[in-house]
Image (cartoon, grey):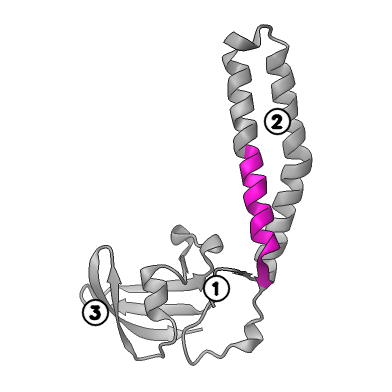
Amino acid sequence: MADNNFVYLTKERLVELERELQELKTNGRKEIAAKIAEARSHGDLSENAEYDAAKEEQGMFELKINKLEKILSRARIIDMSQFSNDQVHILSLVSIKNLKTKKIFDYTLVSPEEADFQAGKISVTSPVGQGLLGYKVGDKVKVKAPAGLMEFQILSIK
């Protein structure tokens, strides 16, 4: 499901991104404009570091808005009722055991836009995410990752 033309999101994440975009376009732009106006009021713009910083912040801010608009224009809602828990797919909560270290990890497989390793959300396009897709509970999976060849066993899928 990691098609390059679409961004697969949960309904909740889509609503989150829409709210964030709306906030950036309204209050965020007003705040940036106020910072620029304040910096402009300090005189000569050619030697005004505060003005330069505010303009740079505005550029980064507009890039973020643009990125969110692109994501939302390609967004597709994932309906979890389309999937069963008998094999790993996007939005699966997978418990895996590293067969070398014997450590157990729990990951939710998400789209690249939702990935957050600290929160246990890995992208379906990451080496581990790609390696797990389509496998079932009990399967042993070999994943070629930057750290080398890793071997996991799938303990559960929710």
The residues colored magenta run: 61-76
Q: Which residue is mark 3?
A: 99
Front residue of 51/80: it is 51
Look at the numbered disc 3 and give the secondary structure of its residue. loop
Q: Residues within 10 Å of mark 3 (few under 14, many from 20)?
A: some
Three-letter amino acid code of the residue under disc 3 = Leu
Residue at position x 68%, y 57% in the image? 17
Distance of label 1 from label 2 (alpha carbons): 35 Å
Residue at position x 74%, y 36% in the image? 29
Q: Which residue is mark 2?
A: 32
Location of residue 151 in the rendering, given as x and y in whole percent from the top left corner: 26, 78
**Circle 1 or circle 3, nearest the eye:** 1
Q: Which mark is residue 3?
A: 1
Q: Which residue is most to the front?
A: 5
Quarter-wise, where is residue 14 in the image? bottom right
Location of residue 65 in the rendering, given as x and y in whole percent from the top left corner: 67, 46
Labels 2 and 3 touching (C-beta < 8 A): no
Q: Earlier in the sequence, mark 1 or mark 2?
A: 1
Location of residue 155 in the rendering, given as x and y in whole percent from the top left corner: 37, 85
Look at the numbered disc 1 and give the secondary structure of its residue. loop
Distance of label 1 from label 3 (alpha carbons): 31 Å
